[in-house]
Amino acid sequence: MDKEQTAVSDKVYEKRWIILAVMSLSLVIVILNNVTLNVALPELSKDLKADNTDLQWMMDAYALIFGGTLLVMGALGDRFGRKPALQLGLIIVAVASGATAMYATTSEHVIFARGVMGLGAALVMPATLSVVVVVFPVEERGKAVGIWAAMAGAGAPIGLFVGGWAVENYDWQMVFWINVPVIILALTLGLFLVPNSRDKQKRPLDLIGSLLSIGALVSILYAIIEAPNVGWTSPETIGVAALGIVLTLAFIRWERSTEYPMLPIDLFRNMGFTMGLVAISLAFFVMFSFMFTQMLHFQLVRGHTALQAAIRFLPLPLGLMPAAANSDKFVAKFGSNNVVATGLTLITAGMLLFTTVEIDTDYVRIAVTFFMLGLGMGLTMAPSTTLVMESIPEDKAGVGSATNDASREVGGALGIAIGGSVLNEYYQRNLAVPEGLESFGSVLTESFPAAMRIGADLIAGGNPLGAELIMNARLAFMDGMVGSAMVSAGIALTTAILVKLYMPGKTE
């Protein structure tokens, strides 16, 4: 038995880099689905007669189900096998994608399908990282996790590019069709190359902990997602957020008392684990907040198409991917805390540089900001992810990976919500409505896209006030964008200080 096990291990070891490539491909599918639909929303609005609420839930259904079920799906992978979890998740995403492209005729169809895809993605993403951790020996794990983190970070801007290409050259259905052949490739390669692994002790599932984790994560994510629409101090936001906090406390209490906890709470005593999660969450706060404002900036202020806007994001992955893939070398020389703190400082510098951007600023300065953000993200994500996974027993690799992924989701959702709220607050406060357009009421101040659309309609109708409205709206938007960047810079700098002080340095 030992000889057979050794032979299998040697065979897996020889194929470890190919396995990493398959895991990276599977991971990119999950990340792409989180953002590609962004650029298809205008087409969906026209074709399916979807209103703003429908469009929002087409995006949010995926994020809510994905983020809410991550811990449970990671635990299922640990218990029943990470390879079956990965394969099943990919099949769910493929079937939901194909069915949506062929049969969706209403907003409700798309919203439901996006929720199903989120469930499949929650099976896939934890499995990819846990397989990487199990397959690679300790001395190569930092490099492998760095490449995984590079793909996780680069997937979002690449997803905008893919979505822009699909919509500009085909239709919104192509955003869903793209998934199918890529998933078939990942499934086929995974079937023959990816080894199975699971919790060798075969501990029973923590059913109560699973239900509490779903309730807590869904409540927290729902409150974050809805807060910009219903108000941060509205009864709905406060009530749902309070429910999320209560369920989180109940989850912690249960996990401490049960014999077989899904997520051992003692892990949070390890500063590598805790500070790794904090760094990842707040780095994604900055990244998603920035990407959200920049899609509006490029399309509505600078007049680019969705594809042209997405192309302008490419300096971000060009900085992120090499930084993440090679971060293990820097960690070996300077220590995790110094590398991650440097990454967050680069993010801070990039955000501060961006506060100097104006309407007519040359793209080169913006590209430098994207590149600096990418470098900072790469140096932050990969070492932080490695620390998180090194803190977790191999039998809990799926749950550990899911905790890592959940921190990204919460951070990204907070970034979009808070970054968008800051932008809107500045926009509403600074928009000067031209005299004679008061009849439009609060529509102009509440919605930048609406102001731009109304301004274009006025120009088409020969009303010179349209040009004045568009210029004022752009200026007010730029004020909001700078305000949002300042908030991101403050958060990145604060996190850099915390990481420098409390994250472990070199691990001998």
Image: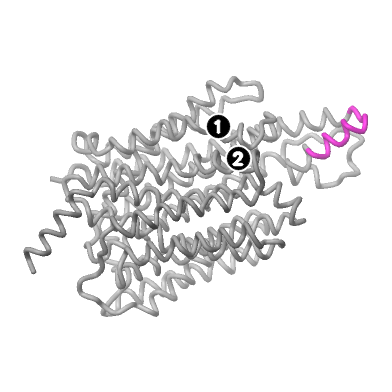
Residue at left 91%, top 44%? 439
| Residue 126 place in picture, x, y as percent | 36, 59
Q: Which residue is mark 1?
A: 311
- Residue in front for this viewpoint, 404 or 250: 404
Residue at left 32%, top 42%? 147
The reply to whether the C-beta atoms of the residues labelled 1 and 2 are less than 8 Å apart is: yes
Among the two numbered marks 1 and 2 on one chain, the one whose residue lies closer to the N terminus = 2
Residue at left 77%, top 37%? 452
Quadrant of the image containing the C terminus: top left
Q: Which residue is mark 2?
A: 164
- Residue in front for this viewpoint, 358 or 44: 44
| Residue 378 place in picture, x, y as percent | 36, 38
As helix, strand or loop, the secondary structure at mark 1 comes to helix
Relative vertical location of residue 391 with respect to residue 166 in this rendering, above or below: below
Label 1 sits on what residue type? Ile
Total marks placed: 2
The stretch of residues the image draws in magenta is: 453-464
Using a 10 Å C-alpha cutoff, classify the residue at mark 2 as few (fewer than 14 neighbours), some (14 to 19) or many (20 or more): many
Q: Is residue 444 left or right of residue 168?
A: right
- Residue in front for this viewpoint, 268 or 447: 447
Quadrant hosting residue 87:
bottom left
Can the viewer see residue 414?
A: no
Determine which of the numbered discs, if any, sits on residue 262 in the image: none
| Residue 363 place in picture, x, y as percent | 57, 23
Quadrant of the image containing the N terminus: bottom left
Quadrant hosting residue 300:
top right
